[in-house]
């Protein structure tokens, strides 16, 4: 006696195989790498204030970091694709929005969307969010996390996150 598979009724029925979408909110993440130069300096304050506040990061001759950027998108998997967001689309968005303008650049002087911004890791995650969020085609931006070094990173959950509770 033939085995009756739920999605394959063989010749007994001409109906198409069906997929079974699953409900549930999930988060997908893409990680990219870039390196860039910067200087932490607030020109509204004195040189000694800047040296005291930023230490070696205030070096007037710049310094560089190997940045690791993680971008997470949240949503329910599309019942047709099973994707919250197509990661190859996200890869392309991150390339155009972040890597092309920032990789191997000086963040203080070469990146239009950072003009006038002190390029701390904190400010970078906010600026990167603002660049990425409008370009997403599906899902919504959940978190932007940027490692400035192996031990130091900042993350941003968007303008609605007040910090008194982690978002769902
Ligand atoms: Ni630095």
Image: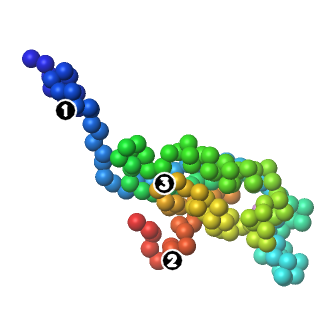
Q: Is residue 25 left or right of residue 132?
A: left
Q: Is residue 124 left or right of residue 108?
A: left
Tell me: residue 162, above or below residue 69: below
**Residue 101's spot in the image, x, y percent?**
75, 54
Mark 3: few/some/many CA within 10 Å (<14, 14-19, 20+): some
In this figure, what is the number of numbered marks? 3
* Residue that mark 3 sits on: 138
Q: Ligand 1 closer than 8 Å to the CB at disc 3?
A: no
Find residue 125 and report its image quarter: bottom right
Quadrant of the frame with the C terminus? bottom left
Disc 2/disc 1 C-alpha distance (Å): 47 Å
Eye-nearest disc, 2 or 3? 3
**Residue 43's spot in the image, x, y percent?**
85, 77
Residue at the front extreme?
14
Residue at the left extreme?
1
* Residue that mark 2 sits on: 162
Marks 3 and 1: CB-CB under 8 Å? no
* Residue that mark 1 sits on: 6
Q: Residue at x 39, y 49 (%)?
A: 78
SS of the residue at dot 3? loop
**Residue 32's spot in the image, x, y percent?**
63, 48
Disc 2/disc 3 C-alpha distance (Å): 24 Å
First of labels 2, 3 by sequence position:
3
Mark 2: few/some/many CA within 10 Å (<14, 14-19, 20+): few
């Amino acid at each position: 006696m033939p085995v009756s598979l739920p999605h394959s009724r063989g010749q007994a029925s001409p109906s198409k195989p069906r997929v079974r979408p699953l409900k549930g909110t999930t988060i997908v993440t893409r990680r990219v790498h870039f390196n860039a130069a910067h200087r932490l300096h607030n020109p509204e304050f004195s040189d000694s204030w800047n040296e005291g506040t930023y230490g070696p990061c205030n070096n007037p001759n710049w310094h560089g970091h190997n940045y690791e950027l993680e971008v997470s998108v949240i949503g329910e998997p599309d019942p047709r694709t099973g994707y919250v967001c197509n990661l190859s689309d996200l890869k392309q968005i991150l390339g155009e929005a972040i890597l092309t303008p920032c990789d191997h650049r000086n963040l203080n002087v070469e990146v239009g969307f950072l003009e006038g911004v002190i390029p701390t890791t904190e400010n970078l995650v906010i600026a990167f969010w603002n660049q990425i969020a409008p370009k997403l085609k599906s899902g919504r931006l959940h978190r932007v996390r940027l490692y400035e070094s192996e031990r130091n990173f900042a993350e941003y959950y968007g303008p609605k996150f007040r910090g008194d509770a982690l978002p769902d």
